[in-house]
Image (cartoon, rainbow, N blue to C red):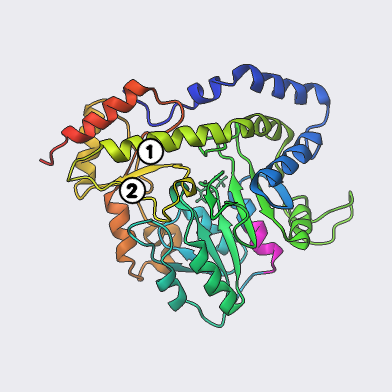
Amino acid sequence: MIKFLDLKKLNGRHGAELRAAVRRVTDSGSYILGDEVSAFEQEFAAYCGVKHCVGTGNGLDALTLILRGYGFGPGDEVIVPANTFIASILAVTCCGATPVLVEPELESYNIDPVKLAKKISTRTKAIMAVHLYGQCADMKSITVIARKHGLKVIEDAAQAHGAVYGRKKAGSLGDAAAFSFYPVKNLGALGDGGAVTTNDASLARTVAMLRNFGSKDKYLHEIKGVNSRLDEIQAAVLRIKLKYLDADNSKRRSIARYYRSKINNRHIILPSVTSGDECSHVWHQFVIRAKDRDNLQQYLAANGVQTLVHYPVPPHKQKACAEFSRNRYPVTERIHREVLSIPLNPGLTGKEIAVIVSALNDYKPG
Ligand SMILES: *Cc1c(COP(=O)(O)O)cnc(C)c1O
């Protein structure tokens, strides 16, 4: 069976370096907000091309703390794509604001700027652009709409580490961005982790306090914060893995290019690079579509290829989001019915890639 993702193999490529990094922290005696976190924050800010990076406990908290840092709360609306991973929506509800769901474009799976513009009300405070599956949202159109209405643009870049849009990196395309370093992400830790990137010095200061009990100076609490810090071990691990991110992303791009040129089954719709810029996509997932997705998934499993669905149930159909259950999002529902993620990661061998392509090309719906 070709595994969808073999994290042991991926991290094993850097086993000795990762063990040395963990050991360095073990021996340092400093485990929370020490030198590794500061160094990673500087390195990741430089990588993204922004002035500030603040490490957090995970990606959801990074998003939530941005919204709280801007002071959004009850009565405020934040626009979010309807087909995102639920965390983008939970960040809005966590801070007491109201998520307003907007349909994606079927072609890019990212928020549809035309439909977005129609959902802006007097209560709208921000647009959360999610770079889903590793492809940057239409930031040009989103920025025009946001400027016109005086809205903040927040990137959910949890799937887009290293993606480039018009010469700028994901994480530097709006007012602030949230990253997740959950192990399966393009830049993944050996546990939970997250970060906020921004050029807004005041927001960075507030988020740095919010993640640490609302405190800048020990035992003095200026605001009501939470405990959500990136820890030293994960920061040390991420410093190693950041060195390999660009090489890994270019491997992902070359596999995606191969898939897009070799998979030619008329029952399968391949993902597109919508901006026309190959580098805007870092292929966190390679997501195909098929009318009979469940059959295709079973067929692939029977032929030795493990696949996943991102995501089987859209947020508005989740029990946790009953407030949206009456709304209709036909594009989103269609996406959730038809999408299938096939293996694409820097650990795949040429032989595995060939097996995946020929299985897909041999598929005939029943
Ligand atoms: C992974 C992910 C998150 C949440 O990150 P965690 O670190 O797991 O909290 C948020 N948004 C998107 C789009 C994600 O893929």
Looking at the image, residue 258 lies above or below residue 104: above
Looking at the image, residue 92 lies above or below residue 157: below
User: What secondary structure characterizes most of the magenta part?
Assistant: helix
Q: Please count the marks in the image.
A: 2
Whichever of callouts 2 and 1 sits on the residue coming sooner in the sequence is 1
Separation of disc 2 and disc 1 at Cα?
A: 9 Å
Instruction: Pinpoint residue 16: horizontal percent, then vertical percent.
Output: 63, 16
Q: Which residues are magenta?
A: 64-71
Residue at mark 2: 271
Instruction: Pinpoint residue 228: horizontal percent, then vertical percent.
Output: 70, 47
User: At x 29% / y 26%, what residue is drawn?
Assistant: 354
Instruction: Specify the amino acid type for callout 1.
Output: Ala
Whether pointer 2 and pointer 1 mark residues with C-beta atoms closer than 8 Å, the reply is: yes
Is 244 or 207 nearer to us in this picture?
244
Tag 1 secondary structure = helix
Residue at mark 1: 256
Relative to residue 106, is residue 87 drawn left or right? right
Looking at the image, residue 264 lies above or below residue 90: above
Magenta span has 68? Answer: yes
Relative to residue 197, is residue 272 drawn left or right? left
Is 49 or 293 nearer to us in this picture?
49
Looking at the image, residue 301 lies above or below residue 207: above
**Residue 349 lies in quadrant:** top left
Relative to residue 122, is residue 118 drawn left or right? left
| Quarter of the image with the C terminus in it | top left
Residue projecting furthest to the left: 366
Instruction: Specify the amino acid type for callout 2.
Output: Pro
User: At x 43% / y 56%, what residue is drawn?
Assistant: 275
**Residue 37 lies in quadrant:** top right
Q: Residues within 10 Å of mark 1 (few under 14, many from 20)?
A: many
